[in-house]
Image (cartoon, rainbow, N blue to C red):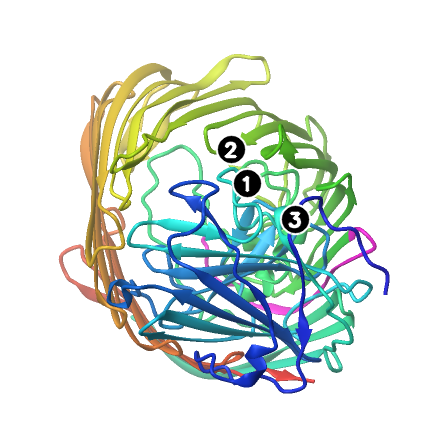
Amino acid sequence: MPVLPAPASHPEIEIVRTPTPPTIDGVLDEEVWDRAAVIDNLTQVEPVEGVPPTRRTEIRILYDARFIYFGVRCYDSEPDRIIATQLRRDGSLDADDRVELVIDPIFDMRSGLFFATNPVGARLDGLVINNRQIDRDWDGIWYVKSSIDDEGWVAEFAIPFQTISFNSKTTRWGFNLERVVRRDREVSRWSAPSRNIEIQSVADAGILDGIDEITQGLGLDVRPYARGTYLKEPSDDDLKGTGGLDLRYRLTPAISLTLTFNTDFAETEVDQRRVNLTRFPLFFPEKRGFFLQDAGIFRFGGIRFNPLPFFSRRIGLDENGLPVRILAGAKLTGRAAGWNLGFLSTYMDSTSTLDRKLLTVGRVALNVLDESAVGFIVTAGDPLGNGDNWVVGPDFNFRTGTLFGDRVLEANAFLLYSDTSDGDAEVTGDDVSWGFKLDYPNDRVNWSIDVTEIGADFNAALGFVPRRGIREYIGRWRYRWRPPGSFIRTIDSGLRGELITNLSNDVETRELNLNLLEITSNAGDSLELETSFNREVLDQPFEIQPGNTIPVGDYEFARYGVELATADSRPLSVLASVEAGEFFSGDRLDTTLAVQLRPSDHFFASIEWERNDVDLPTGDFIVNTVRVQADILFNPDLSWSNLIQWDDVSNSLGINSRVRWIIEPGNDLFFVVTQAFDTDGTFATTSTQIVSKVVWTFLF
């Protein structure tokens, strides 16, 4: 096989093929581990950069034809102080001791996979996107077991090659591992142990060499599901069953074709309830598995919010956020010879106002330079209308992690054009959007500059464009001090400015946020002080609440805030914040109080209360939002999660109770109860839905 060049100055290790696979039980007591390649030279990143860790870590690596195995021994002379509070699949491990590893099986030094566990074997995974982001909503099939003993703790990983895409033309993979000791927030890493670099930067990963003659079998995954649903509403009762199927076939080890029929997302976690006191729609992340697989390929232009040309949540939901059945879908994704390819097409069912329709997105990007790419996107279809909509455009995404030695510099540029038809005639006008961003995301000094223009008629029907007909200028700067020999870990200070004008350069929004002081202790406790100076120019009335409208005008106001949070590694942690000051022509007081309880790894509870007290000449109102989470974790494979949400705008109490049993990775049983109550005096039940769903994965 040809050998691709490794990044300069990155560690390499030749890994060992084993004829006998290890047993994944969280105990490194088998002879095969004695023959494994060993990494034991981690370097501290926090709290002191570049010195040896205070606790030794050994990583043993093996592979066979079907799996790659990692055995991690985390030495700790005080095992009774090891912190492990999370058992839930994809739960946050931020409060725990943990090991995190990334692999880059394509070896493109841009994308990869993220896996993490804690001392009780919780599983967390995600997609590494452009060396910067980890999309933790992705779920893969893999195995891990952990155990605590007198020497510390151990984690054993087994990752099937059937789960991942890899480059069959090289024996080299990118790899990095990071260990976190939570009680003193010590972080150590194998490759690139710099505060300017994060674990997800696979461009800075080390190299595993010698991976050869591996297989994905036939490369076919068959994933059927069966679901039973009982729905009770005041006017109707309905009991029905349904089923569907997902098929995934690997055309090559790095390119996959996925087909879905009668797609179902009944087990998807509900969104966090938020009350919107702005003029623009809120953004909610994608959580559905079919759209998350290889989602990073469809990312465009470094855009995180506005104007997104493609936002998969537009598919399968109507204008009220209610589900619309996806009859079928196809997705082709992969990477080959420096190209990143993505094609997604879904056939959405009709509704009372919309016809059945085909919704499609295509994305291609070519890797250039060491860590950069140039690409193109096209979308077709309007999920909320019966006309046609097209969006097309190129982008360029630049990154280097070697500026001035180990500094990171990123730049993004894009150009988009939309074309819309209402079914009768073409709509003409300003259909162009463009933008440029320069980002210096480093530890001591961190800044960015962002310029965007969105045409008044720019319409990305398959995207997310909450505000159009604007020019937007954003600048951000932050400086960080690290006092030596102190209980304080970091002191941050900075500012963020945003100016939004219309296309005639008249100001619509101006905001200057001053982060006066943010202090974080070695334990993770924090104190933050900030102030903001705002200007909002309304050229039309803004109905902030039913019957309460802020009139046209030019408004300037200042606000001040303080936030105090205790470390989430404590059994009881608290966050309290207050923001007060002027608001348009009146006043507003925002209060948040959140309490989290972690008495053991089998139970987690939190309660969060947000209160917005708004006093305006047009009327006063108070908005309360309450969220209560209670999770019972029987083991890493069986969990019972409960989310209760209420607000006094909708006067609705929602309860979502979700049992998930992972029979084995890829084979799941869900039981979900969703209950809604009207709290406006009667406390009457408005709807009840009970869903039972089984999903099974067959790998060939």
* Residue 462 visible in image: no
The reply, left or right, for residue 569 in relation to residue 422 is left
Dot 3 corresponds to which residue?
10
Q: Residue at x 34, y 32 (%)?
A: 543
Which residues make up the magenta segment?
320-339
The kind of residue tagged 2 is: Asn
The kind of residue tagged 3 is: His
The reply, left or right, for residue 80 in relation to residue 555 is left
Which of the labelled discs sits on residue 304, or is there none? 1
The CA span between labels 1 and 2 is: 19 Å
Q: Position of residue 677 (x, y in %)?
A: 23, 63
Q: Nearer the viewer, residue 216 or 16?
A: 16
Q: Earlier in the sequence, mark 2 or mark 3?
A: 3
**Above or below: residue 37 compared with residue 226:** above
The kind of residue tagged 1 is: Arg
Q: Earlier in the sequence, mark 1 or mark 2?
A: 1
Which of the labelled discs sits on residue 442, or is there none? 2
- Give the prevailing secondary structure in the magenta stretch: strand
The residue positioned farthest toward the right in the image shown: 2
Q: Nearer the viewer, residue 199 or 358?
A: 199
Q: Position of residue 231 (x, y in %)?
A: 37, 76
The CA span between labels 1 and 3 is: 30 Å
